[in-house]
Image (spheres, rainbow, N blue to C red):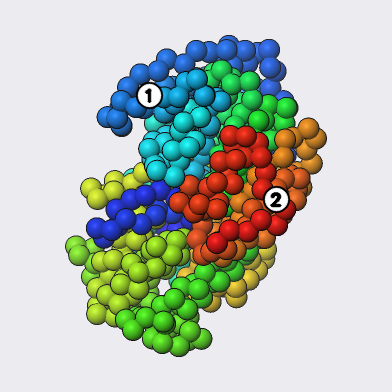
Amino acid sequence: MSLRRVPAVLVVAVLVTSCTTQQPQPAPTVSPTATASPTPDPKALEKFTRQELTWGACASFADKAFDCAKLTVPLDYLKPDGETISIGVLRHKTKKVERRIGSLVLNPGGPGGSGVSAAARIAKSRPAAALAERFDIVGFDPRGVGISDPKLVCLTDAERDADRAEDSESDLTPDGIAKQLADARTYAAKCAERTKHGKELLANIGTRDVVRDLDVLRSALGDEKLTYLGFSYGTQIGTAYAEAYPDKVRALLLDGAVDPELDTAESLVTQMAGFQNTFAEFGKWCVAREDCALGRDANAVTRVFQDLVRPLITEPVPAGTRKLSFEDAITGTSAALYSADAWKFLNDGLAELKRGSGKTLVALADNYYGRETDGRYTGIFDVYFAVRCVDSTRIADRRVIEGAHQRMLQGAPFLAGGTPDMSELDICSVWPVPATSKVHKPDIDGLPRPLVISTTDDPATPYASGVNLARDLKGALLTFEGAQHTVFLDGNECVDSAGFAYLIDGELPAPDTRCS
């Protein structure tokens, strides 16, 4: 089954080929803030909003500065007396109790990124020290993720490895496309069969319900209003929360924004163009080096790259005890485009491929998929598809799907030879539960002005997406001139100081503020 190469979003420090880089995770979906679902009864939810969290040691973190708890929420908010599930929460309490403002709740992206892991990393990072003095840093694992229970399970580790090794997505014949669609149906069925609560969890795993969980968490933390930090897909959660609970917002900082008005196909077309743009920036960086694996002509890097990776479709190369497939080469390349800090690894990997080895590109792809050194996967991609498929109206028309595919490859010729989009559109076209949200333009009254940060050469959430979100939310836009995905708390003094002033004091940067 071929289910891969969706653009990534989450930024988490990890070890890749013995060097520190940043780990991307699956891409953001379009804004699912409008839904026809009935509104839950606040009175019936009081037993959840008034719960007291029981904090204790964190099983995954030996650091005593962290404590963890489980938040109990309804599986279905319209059935508050029915089944419940638990949401994993991590907290880093500020030591400056006398200066404490409240909780800063964050989400790192995905869908499927672990807020627990991200909060643990951010709370102890040097750039976040000013925030850790004023806030309790809080992260939560959304439904189906990490230490939340139940965890969504679709593929086994062995099945995921086999999927990555198969290059069936390069077969665009009628028989090849029919196989992809059959594989998509099999995958969707496994998600329903292998996960506790099955279809009921799938029907209630989208951003609509993550936002409801977030408000229960806000209340359980004792915060009258929410202070929220969202990266990439996390900006989608923030937007949805603002629509559902505008009177309960203290501050929203949204970095790497998802455009709330693009459906799945349009968001993918836009993202592919963003990836091509960043690939071109990588090419300019590369050709200035004597060791550039793609030569010295910036206008030829896409062609040279294609000449290097296309043979992998029929002849994978060794990668240690494994093989580098064409799809993994494309995935590893895309993963490295999320930060210029990873471009050296990409150049090394391409040079290595010229010598007949795929070890570095496989490592970059492993990083992207959340594959641990022992062969286990974090499961982020299963959550990605589950959320993606209920967060916007289903596209079932094959002409629309195939038309979107052609537009994507036109916008990103460095990806030619595979189908970076078809898997996602296919899976969602046969998903076993209906969508719970739809795309629309946010229209919110009474919302404190948010701060939106957008990066000029962001591959996954192009700059225009941040411009559009800031406009729709009537917020302030901070522009970062760079080539990476998300930037706040990355050590850029200009960006970080503006973010601190907003989150701590509510001060927004002047119009047209730009950082570099």
Q: For this rendering, which residue is in front, 430 or 108?
A: 108
Measuring from the top left, give residue 248's x and y in whole percent. Answer: 68, 26
Measuring from the top left, give residue 484's x and y in whole percent. Answer: 50, 61
Q: Specify the amino acid type for callout 2.
A: Ala
Which labelled disc corresponds to residue 288?
A: none
Q: For this rendering, which residue is in front, 50 or 514?
A: 514
Q: For this rendering, which residue is in front, 89 or 324?
A: 89
Vertical order, 56 against 3 (above or below): above
Vertical order, 29 against 315 (above or below): above
Q: Quadrant of the N terminus?
A: bottom left
Q: Residue at x 51, y 45 (%)?
A: 109
Q: Look at the numbered disc 2 and give the secondary structure of its residue.
A: loop
Q: Residue at x 63, y 59 (%)?
A: 514
Vertical order, 410 against 159 (above or below): below
Which labelled disc corresponds to residue 510?
A: 2
Measuring from the top left, give residue 466's x and y in whole percent. Answer: 65, 54
Disc on the earlier residue, 2 or 1: 1
Q: Quadrant of the C terminus?
A: bottom right
Measuring from the top left, give residue 5's x and y in whole percent. Answer: 46, 61
Q: Residue at x 55, y 46 (%)?
A: 497
CB within 8 Å, label 2 to label 1: no
Q: Residue at x 75, y 48 (%)?
A: 472
Looking at the image, residue 4 sits to the left or right of residue 450; the answer is left
Q: Specify the amino acid type for callout 1.
A: Asp
The residue carrying pointer 1 sits among few (fewer than 14), some (14 to 19) or many (20 or more) residues within 10 Å by Cα, namely many
**Residue 350 sits in quarter:** bottom left
- Residue 436 seen from this side: no
Vertical order, 151 against 31 (above or below): above
Alpha carbon distance from label 2 to label 1: 38 Å
Q: Residue furthest left?
A: 321
Q: Disc 1 marks which residue?
A: 67
Number of numbered labels in the structure image: 2
